[in-house]
Each structure stands twice: as C-alpha cells, then as structure tokens.
Image: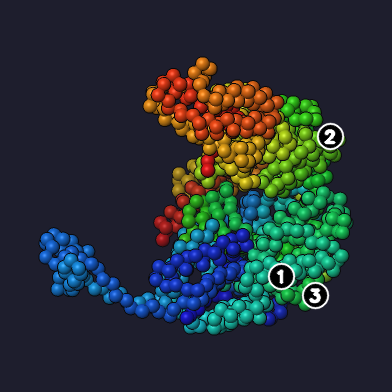
Amino acid sequence: MVRRKIDSTQEPVETPRSFQGLILTLQQYWAAQGCVVLQPYDMEVGAGTFHPATTLRALGPASWNAAYVQPSRRPADGRYGENPNRLQHYYQFQVIMKPSPADAQELYLGSLRAIGIDPARHDIRFVEDDWESPTLGAWGLGWEVWCDGMEVTQFTYFQQVGGIECDPVPVELTYGLERLAMYLFDRRSVYDLPFNDPGSRAPVLYRDVFHQAEVEYSRHNFEHADVAMLLRHFRDAELECEALLARGLALPAYDQCIKASHRFNLLDARGAISVAERQAYIGRVRALAKSCCERWLANQAANG
Amino acid sequence: MAELLVELFSEEIPARMQARAADDLQRLACDGLKAAGLSWTSARAFATPRRLALVVDGLPLATPDRVEEVKGPRVGAPEQAVQGFLRKLGEGRTLDDCETRADGKGESWVFVRRVAGTDTASAAVAAIRAAVAQFPWPKSMRWGANRASWVRPLHGVVALLDGRALEGAIELGAGRVAFGDHTRGHRFLAPGAFAVAGFADYRDRLRQAFVVLDPAERRAEVERQARAVAAAQGLVLKDDPGLLDEVAGLVEWPVAHAGTIDAEFMALPPEVLATSMRAHQRYFTLLDQAGSTAPRFVVVANMATDEAGAANIVAGNERVLRARLSDAKFFWDQDRKARLDSRVPALRERTFYARLGTLEEKVVRLQALAAELAASIPGCSREQAQRAALLAKADLPTGMVGEFPELQGVMGRYYALADGEAPAVAEAVREHYSPLGPGDRCPSAPVSVAVALADKLDTLVGFFAIGEKPTGSKDPFALRRAALGVIRLVVENRLRLGLSAAFDAAHRLYAGQLGDAAGASPAAELGAFFADRLKVALKEQGVRHDLVDAVFAPGGEDDLVRLLARVEALRAFLGGEDGANLLVAFRRGANIVAIEEKKDGRRHDGEVVPADLVLDEENALDAALRTATPVVEAALAREDFAAAMAALAGLRAPVDAFFAQVTVNDANPALRANRLRLLSRIRATLGRVADFTRIEG
C-alpha cells in the first residue's frame, strides 16, 4: 500500500469550509493512503458497512483498501425535520483497510488533521465501543473516537462478518459526516450546515438540499409506508435471495439481503413488528447475509 | 538483587478492564517466575489507557546449580525393584550411574542428579511470553494478518532485568513484537519513543512525557482537580466513586475543565441531568451549597492545551451535552403527553421471562398480590397499593427509560406525579425496585412496601415454580437479592406476615394465568431458601446461625418478626448464667434419655407417674415443670419471649438439684422409667421455645 508520508507539523493545504468540502478532503486524504475511492452503493442501506465493499470484501485473504461515502437510511430516526441532530437519511464516510495496518490510529489521526482538527488543541480520545451488527452476523472490537466529548468516528477491528472469521482482520472507520461537519463549522442545527462553500456564487445549505426530504420521508416511514406491501416485499426479497444463491450468484443475492434489511427497518419504524417478532426478523436477515458471505467467498476462491 | 520491569504497550485498553488486567499481569508473570524456582521481595502492577506495567523487585540474577539425590532400593534388593528404580531415572540408566549410601540398616542405591540453576533472564522472558499467551481478557481480538490475540493491537514490550533489555519477543503470527527498552509517552503531548533504564526512571520519564503511571494517583489527581474546579465556581463536586475510577482509566494526563449547562435544560429532573452527563459523557455533576444540581459540570480531558485549546474543549463538550440534553428534553416532553396508565397495555410486548409470560401479566399479578399484602401492612391503602402496582412497570415503554434504563422507577414517579397520581402511589412506583442490596435504602412508606414486596415475591415464586433456582455462584435472576429484599422489607418495617401464606398467594396468581405450567407451590422450598438467606443476613449482623436454626427447627415459624424476637430472646437467655447452665443440664438430660431409650429400644416420653416420685428433688423438679409449662405457653402465646425464657430460667435450680441428688438408673425399673420420663419433660418444655439440640458451642 503506497502512502503519502504524514507530516503532523504541516498545515493542511486547505481546510474544508463546507459539507461537500469535508467529503472531498477525506476522499483525497484516503486516496493518498492507497485506498480506492468508490462511489455509494446504489441501494437503500442502514450504514456504510452494508456496502459490499465492506461486508463482502472484509472476508477472504486478499488485501483491500477502500473509501467511500454512503448515504444511510434509518427510518426510525426521522424527526420530521424538527430535530436539529437527527435525520432518517444521512451520510457516512467509510474506510476499510484489510489487513488493518499497524499505524491505523495514526493514519486516522492524519485524516483529522486534514479536515482541520489539530489534536494539540482538542481532546481526542479512543473510548471503548464494541461493534455488533446482528443483521450482518458481524462483530468487532474498537472504539468510538471522541473529539472534545463528541463521537466523531467509529473505529472497529472486524473479527467476524456473516458469521465467518475475518482473516486477515480489516479495520473499519466510519465518520458520521453531518455531526463532524456541525462540529467543524460550529452549527447547532444540521440544517444550517453550508453544503457548498458559503463564499461561492450560489451558497446552498443542508436545509435546502434535504429538509423537505426529511419531512416527507418521516411521514412515509412512520405513517404511510404500506405495511402489507412491505411484509410482502420482505418475503419476496428473502425468496429471491435464496433463489439467486441456489444459482451461485452471491452479489445479486446480497442485493436482496440488503432489500430485506431495509424493508425490516421500515416495518420497525411503522411499529409493525412486535418486540417478540423482532429477533426472528433479524435472524432471517442474518441467515441471508451469512449465506451471501459464504457464497461470495466460495466464488472468490473459485476465481482464484 | 535485580529488578524486572515489564511494559505491554498497546492501543487504548477499555477503562473497565484496566484494574483487573494489571492484577492479571502481576499474577501470571509472577506465577511463571515462581514456577522457575525464583523468589522476589515485592511486585506491583499498573495500568494506563495504553499500557500495562509490572515491576518485580528483589529477584536474584540467577539461582545456583544444585544437587538432588534420588533414593533407590537396598543393595541386593530383588531385580524387579532395581529395574523399577532405573526406569524412574530415565532412559538408559544403569546401576553404574548410581552410588551407594550407607545408613544404620545397610547400603542403598542413590542417583545423584545435578540440576542447573535458573537463569532469571530466560525465566523472565518465558514468564512474560506465557503471561501474554494466557492473558484472560474479558474480550480480545486479532489484528492485521496476525493470529495472536490481545485486548487491542499490541505494539511494544519493554522488558528490563537489572536495567538491561531482555532478548525475546512476542510472536504474533505474521509479525512479532521484540522486547526492548523503549516506550512512548502521551499520544499527543510526547509522541516520540524514549529509552528507560529501570522502574524509577520509567515512572519519572513517563511523568515528563505526560503520563501518570499509577491509576490510584491519576484517580486522586482527577478528584483533586475536579474539586478545585468546583470550588472555583463556589460549588461542590457530587460524590461519584465509580465515575472517578472510570475517568482515571480514560486519561493518562488528566486536566479538568468546567462547562455550563444551558438554562433551558435545568427544568429536567436532576436524575436525568446526572444520568445523561454520566452515562454518555462521563461528566461530573456539581451541586450548589443547598445540594441542588448546579448548571455546571466538570469534564476531565486527557490533554493539556493552550487557552484556545481549552476553549475548544469546553465549547465542544457543551455542544455535545446540549445535543444529549435536547434528546432527553424531547423524551421528557413526549413522555408526558401520554398518561402513564395508558402505557400499561404496551407491557404486553415485553417478556418478563419466557416461561413466566409478559410484563403485562406480571402487572396483573402484582396488583392482586399488592392488594392482598396491603392487609398486613399498617396504614397501607389497598386501592393505592393496587394502583401503584398497575403503574409500577409502566415507565418501561417511555422514551426516557428506553434511553436510560437505569432511570426505571425514577421516571415512573415523575410521570405519575405529572398525571396527578397520589404522591404515595408515585413514590411506590419509584421505590418498588428497592432495596437493591444490603447497602440500599429500604422503603418504609406503606404503599411502597406493598409493591416492593409483591414484585419480589412474584419473581421468587415464579422462578422457583419453574425450577430456575440459584445454584452455587449462579443466580442469573438475582433471586438471593430479591429474598434479602423481602427479609429487609418485612423485618425493618416489622410486618406481621406469614411467608408461606404469601408464597402460596403469589403462586395462586401464577396458577390462574399459567394453569398446570405453574407447577406446585414452591412455598416449602422457598421457606428453606429464606432460612438460608436469613442466616446469611443475620450472620453479617453478628447473630449466630445455630440460634436461627434452633428457632426455625420446630417448624411452622414463618413470621420473620416473631422469629427474630425469639432468636434475640434466646441469645440473651443463653448469654446469662441461668441459660448457660440450663443448656448444660438440658444436654446432660437429653443424652441420658437418648442412651437409655436406645438401650431399651423404646421411648420414655409418657406422663410422669406422681406415685413413683420418691425423692424430694424429683418432686421439686416435677412441680417446677408443671408450674413452668403453662407459664411458657402463655408467654409464647402473647409473644413475650423474654418471659418464656425467664420461666425456663426458673427450672435451673431444680434441674441442677435433680442431677446432684438423683440417680436416674435406679435398680427399681419403675423409678428409673419415671425419672427418664421426667428428663424427657425437660426436653419437651424447652422444645416449646427452641430446639436446644441445634445450639452449638
């Protein structure tokens, strides 16, 4: 892996001044560390981890270094655009490096410097936070990284994905971009974030881009999503996933697993799933994820 | 004498694991040294967020070679014995390798084995490697392409013996960590590596590199700074030893700052403020002089900065707290929009325990049981007890308790008050989980006592009925704690409550819901379980367990208040001269009767025949027993146990005189049998009060 030498004394060339600037800076930084910069996966997912570039690539012996933005949907977190801190659609910046490099923490701190957080003038802490995704059958150990008391990144050494042991072990970094931006640009409401450079010819705020979506999707997620249809779609996705796996198609099958997972999240937001049923649904998605991971690994091995 | 210094340098170790890890390092490494035949004068271990360290003092650099003699058979012993001896010595040994030793009885074969001394350096390397390999982290992980596990990636090992780096390494699989003499200080304040020469040098250089090695010292420093910051605001730090421990594990170089809580959040319940600050952010709560929560908090950073940095840190933490408290405020406002009683049906969604049904079903039982218990609790309103039981679990589906489970009950009280419930009902919703342990406050308000008892009795009876009883150290449903809670509630409130009846009542409610699945009433088993818990609880208060046994043994005593009064009276009685003497006489009499009954193959427990009482002392004892018996009975009936004991004390003189003057085993069988009956009467009379055979000492 080719990396730009990190010089902590060097002032960042240009500190981002907007939400999109933050994304561009992180992409440039991680590209310079040898990561392939991917684009978001074109499906509704709850977190950047669901992108096949993480879930599937975390497995198997091949080295893999990637960075990408992933729009993430958490239907139950919708607040009708009224809560300044909560969104049902937000962005994660995701970095996955396999095997985890020995200087993973230093590389990460380099990215903070790149976006304008000088560790000498902040209180940066690595606070225990074990990560688990019951729907992906995945877990890992690591921390939430605190900057002045705020969680800015989830830092995880994956141990298992799809119930399969990771060997070698990848490290996953997940930046919550809105929260990080609110901190960097000192905004109390996510909607007041500068989406592009406030000094540009046509300044745009986060509100301009997403507020209406938050209102409409909150109504959809909580009030109008058709429960009977969602239940049917969940079942369809499950059946299709199994059918595709039977034909050895790991990646298309995994798409169906992602669909099932999102349908489940919507059903959950609609209050259509009882506490007792919840575990069963999670187990069904996990079973799909596990089979997809196994199939993907087998196909990788077969392709040499 | 040499010093061994070990440091295991890694990425950040979870705060909660550090203290135990330091102990484990010391134990495992020292076990390795001991197994190598080494001894030392002292060992100490330390932990910081990024390192475990161990110093062992007073080790020899090496132990000398020594000679061991293996004794064999006599010279001229049978061939079989000789061969057995040689086999024991190892492959290829013959008698040519052995010497002979003469002793008083002749000559024997011996084998002289030379055992090389221990080289401490190699023993230490082995001990360190073994300690790392066996380390019992509660959770550990692999990293990179390695196979080895540690709590987080392990990056460096300092291993110095007598100031010199040991040769060795921890093999990780793909990579290795070589032993050396270099470590690092604070991640940001002193990031470079530096060499250390020994423990004192290590500790001092770490301090210069912004790391306080000793957790106790860090904790003291956190506390000192937090108090100073509070005092500078004219405020007082709220005591929180658990948080001090945790924060000491989150920082290598503590620097405390004061932050401000926005005024709009000060209307939140103080418990919500404190929990939100503590659980998420590890902030300390400050109190004003009146003891109320002040609109300030203390955050302890792991960083020394310039003023601009300090301003960043305070502003950043205030921002986070604002977001956290907005969430809390959202829950607080939302939760109060629905009445607490409207949330009871949502408990249908929550399992109490798979085989014991839902929380909604539990609440139905609690209402009935609390209402029934109310009759035994002076001043308790049946209606209020029932109401409080209905609401007891209703805060569980609220947003606030979903976010902060530790606020269960506390929020229920606030929401009940907001709904206009009676204060006694609201208080009972909060208090019904108590007492949670021996140190926790025990509720005394009648309605609280009723619901607290009902909750615990229901749990105990349910789990016992389906056979989920505590075994050994396993008590997953905290049933011992629940039983102790019941004991405290009953005893401290002096409730006159028959436990068996209460168990049966609780079980009838399960049977009504579960039918045959509820099994038989576990009242008898629970009685024995409670006797054990009571003994444990009383033992901690210095009450002898045999006295509890003596009072329990006659059976039928399940009124804890009466039981304790009997134990106390018995203790006082046996502590006096009359009691102690009577106990001796009782044993003597009981022994004689037991021996003679065995000899005769029949019991001597019939009525005493007055015509066969020939000696004055016999007549006196008979008269005394006839006088005492109704007095004892009457005293017991009115629960005047001191009076019952006093009546027994009156038996002492006639009993002593009887033993001094009367021969039990008279040649006349009729006299003998009558005297044995008289002795049996003593046992029976005393047995009305307690089973004296259970008393030890």
Q: Position of residue B162 (x, y in %)?
A: 49, 82
Foreground disc of the pair 3, 1: 1
Q: Are marks 2 and 3 on the same chain?
A: yes
**The one of B543 and B256 positioned closer to us in this rendering:** B543
- The label number, if any, that marks residue B308 in the structure image: 3
Figure quadrant of residue B318: bottom right
Distance from Cα at disc 2 to Cα at disc 3? 51 Å
Instruction: Chain letter for mark 2, please.
Output: B
Q: Is residue A231 among the parts visible in the rendering?
A: no
Q: What's the amino acid at mark 1?
A: Glu
Q: What's the amino acid at mark 2?
A: Glu
Q: Earlier in the sequence, mark 3 or mark 1?
A: 1
Q: Position of residue B609 (x, y in %)?
A: 51, 17
Q: Earlier in the sequence, mark 2 or mark 1?
A: 1
Along the horizontal axis of the image, is B150 left or right of B284?
A: left
Q: Which residue is mark 1?
A: B221
Q: Position of residue B86 (x, y in %)?
A: 18, 66
Q: Position of residue B287 (x, y in %)?
A: 83, 58
